[in-house]
Image (spheres, helix red, strand yellow):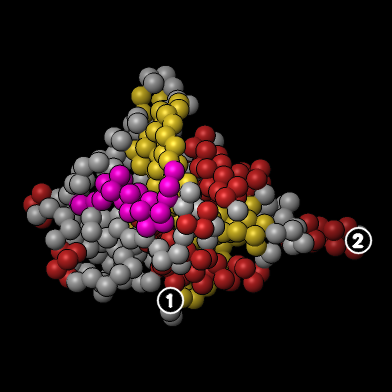
Amino acid sequence: MKYIFLLFFINYLFSADMEKIYTYEDGMLRHYLIYVPDSYNYDTKTKIVFGIHGYGGTASGFESEVSGGFNKLADKYNFIAVYPESTYFYDQENTLVTTFNDIIRSTSFDEISNNCLADDKRIIYPKFPGCDRGRCGWAPCVDDTKFIKNLIEKLQNEYNVKDVYLIGNSTGGMFVNSYACMYPESIKAAISVNGLPRYGFACTPDIPVNFISYASSNDATIPPVKKISSDGLFYESQSVFIEKWKDKFNCQNSREVIYKHYEEFKEIVYSGCSDGIKIMSILNLNADHMWPEAGYDKNSGISSYTNFGTCVGDIQSDLNAAKCYRSNDRWGSEYIIKKLFSFDDSD
């Protein structure tokens, strides 16, 4: 009986369940979710992939509804999946407000105040308590790049890490853009999914790093072509943004292809860049503000917007938000992983 109990205890310790881990950052209690696949072996260097949620989203919402069960890909491709939670608060309607801080450079109250339409022509988002960054400001004042950098270092001390990759969705993609500029040495590659920078806030890192900008042509929330979004905020165009990266790292070659799964994609890969990195621009020619093909309806053949990820799984049931219930497989999640891991050939 004792032997049977011991086996059960060992299996429990190493079973592949997602965990919620608390940590302090600048005196604030923060948390993240982590999934370590059963196949993990400390003697083998293993990749870590971060999934960064968007505005109003959550760590568990990213894993389940946005990506359709991202942990399944961690099992398939043998990587450790990490889902940080942003800082958050509840507005006057008791609605959970979440997002990461994408602003990394010095700015002014007036500069941010001029980054959107007049108040009567836009959506006015609630501001984080004690953080008034200007009329058009909506992100918290915390240093989230430092939070993620410290978390990467923590995990590198706990696991045998090969490379680190970042995936950001929507405002999480905006944050990933900024993180890649601030701490490029800490990651192998990053992809921003429908998360172009605010107008005037595009940046490039001081050292080369592999990077993908993914955008959707029908996206009105963070538009890749038009400057003004449907909610009255100003954003950089994808072409101008990626051109800055290409020029910064002296990319000599480009290859453009158009391909189709259910939705159609225009992809430009820039190579011959500094330190052998690659930069990629992907424009979904059919989709709205959605994870690749998450909004596609096979019956109608139309791609449209659906609100995914503004919910919580049981592991975050302490947050006051709707429960996640949509976790069907997403072709787009494996598509993104394959694109990120393709940079392994850049060594």
Q: Position of residue 345 (x, y in %)?
A: 60, 47
Q: Is residue 146 above or below residue 180?
A: below
User: Which sits earlier in the primary sequence, circle 1 or circle 2?
Assistant: 2
SS class, disc 2: helix
Quadrant including the N terminus: bottom right
| Label 2 Cα neighbours within 10 Å, binned few <14 / some 14-19 / many ≥20 | few
Question: Outermost residue, top direction?
Answer: 299
| Label 1 Cα neighbours within 10 Å, binned few <14 / some 14-19 / many ≥20 | few
User: Is 42 left, or right, of 284 in this rendering?
Assistant: right
Mark number, residue 28: 1
SS class, disc 1: strand
* 275 and 241: which is toward the camera: 275
Give, as a three-letter code, the residue at label 2: Tyr
The residue stretch that appears in magenta: 233-253
Q: Position of residue 241 (x, y in %)?
A: 31, 51
Q: Is residue 165 magenta?
A: no
Q: Is residue 285 above or below residue 86?
A: above
* 29 and 102: which is toward the camera: 102
